[in-house]
Amino acid sequence: MKKISILLSIGLFLIIGIYTYRQSMNEDLEVLSISNDIINDYKDIIIKSGNNDEKVIALTFDDGPDRDFTPQVLDILKKNDVKATFFVVGENVEWNPEILKRQYNEGHEIGNHTFTHINVSKKGYDDIYKEINNTQQAIKKVIGEEPKLFRPPYRAISKSMCNIVKEKDMNIILWSNLDPRDWSNPGVDYIVDTIMSKVQNGTIILLHDYNNLRNKKSQTIQALDIIIPKLKEMGYRFVTVSELINNLEKDKTMQKQE
């Protein structure tokens, strides 16, 4: 009897496990389908890459400004004469306004990454508006202007978010096929190899100038010292996201004229 009971318990456990897995897979597919539908509905303001006929790429950094890591990133960019785009978190701007000012003064582009790094797909219109608007105001207070770019944390998408961004005449910036997941500290070699193996013309590279692991030098910073010279040797030119968008607009205009 004991053996039968054990076998029945195992069978029941497997059935529950398979059912739960299938339910989870169905939910993931449903979320993906909804996200793809939203992206299609708002493709006029969603940017994932630049033109593929030009050897330009955009370095982007999320989650700062950070008092320890952002200045190191800025030092590397300055040393290599490279401009990047920083998607900043509003509360971090309030804690580190002088770093944001430096980013702006050194010619880098500033984008909005919500005020407290929320998942917009789990929030309503009012909460999302407050997060985006408060960040706009925090940035404007420091540099005198509001960003024209917004990147949703976790790549989460919702119709409310898209409508708010559109009302504010902004673009939603995602990223290309290149996410080395540097925030997870996968190793400097992994970050470098992922970028070098996947980079293409018009690629938007996702990196972070904040990390929960508080080392003297993050893996992202160590990787930057390697990849920037390598990408330059390959003939790539670094541009801001707005420069990528401007090139896309020029290309659309030329196609219409033809």
Image (cartoon, rainbow, N blue to C red):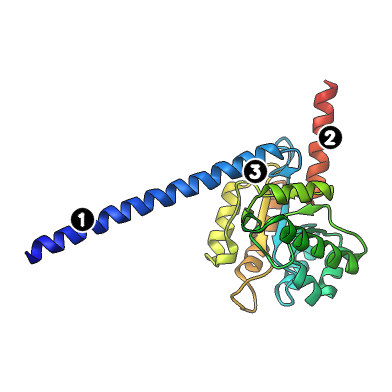
Looking at marks 2 and 3 on the same chain, the residue that comes earlier in the sequence is marked by: 3
Distance from the alpha carbon under mark 2 to that under mark 1 = 62 Å
| Residues at marks 1 and 3 touching, judged by CB atoms closer than 8 Å | no
Which residue lies at the image location 55% right of the left edge and 41% below the top edge?
A: 33
Q: Which residue is mark 1?
A: 11
Q: Which residue is mark 2?
A: 250
Dot 1 lies on which element? helix
Q: Position of residue 23 (x, y in %)?
A: 41, 50
How many numbered marks are there?
A: 3
At label 1, counting other C-alpha atoms closer than 10 Å, the crowd grade (few under 14, some 14-19, many 20 or more) is: few
* Quarter of the picture holding the C terminus: top right
> Viewer-proximal residue, 201 or 70?
70
Q: Is residue 42 above or below residue 83?
A: above
**Type of residue at label 1?**
Gly
Which of the two marks, 2 or 1, is nearer to us in this view? 1
**244 to 1, vertically: above or below:** above
Q: Nearer the viewer, residue 153 or 63?
A: 153
The x and y percentages for residue 123 are 65, 58
- In which quadrant of the rendered image does the N terminus lie? bottom left
| Residue 51: % across, % down | 73, 38
Q: Is residue 171 visible?
A: no
User: Which residue corresponds to mark 3?
Assistant: 200
Q: CA distance from mark 2 to mark 3?
A: 20 Å
Q: Secondary structure at mark 3?
A: loop
Q: Gap between marks 1 and 3, in whole Å? A: 49 Å
**Mark 2 residue element:** helix
In percent of the image, x 72 and y 35: which residue is there? Answer: 53
Amino acid marked by disc 3: Gln
Q: Residue at x 80, y 32 (%)?
A: 251
Q: Viewer-proximal residue, 143 or 108? A: 143
Q: Amino acid at mark 2?
A: Lys
Whether the residues at callouts 2 and 1 have beta carbons within 8 Å, the answer is no
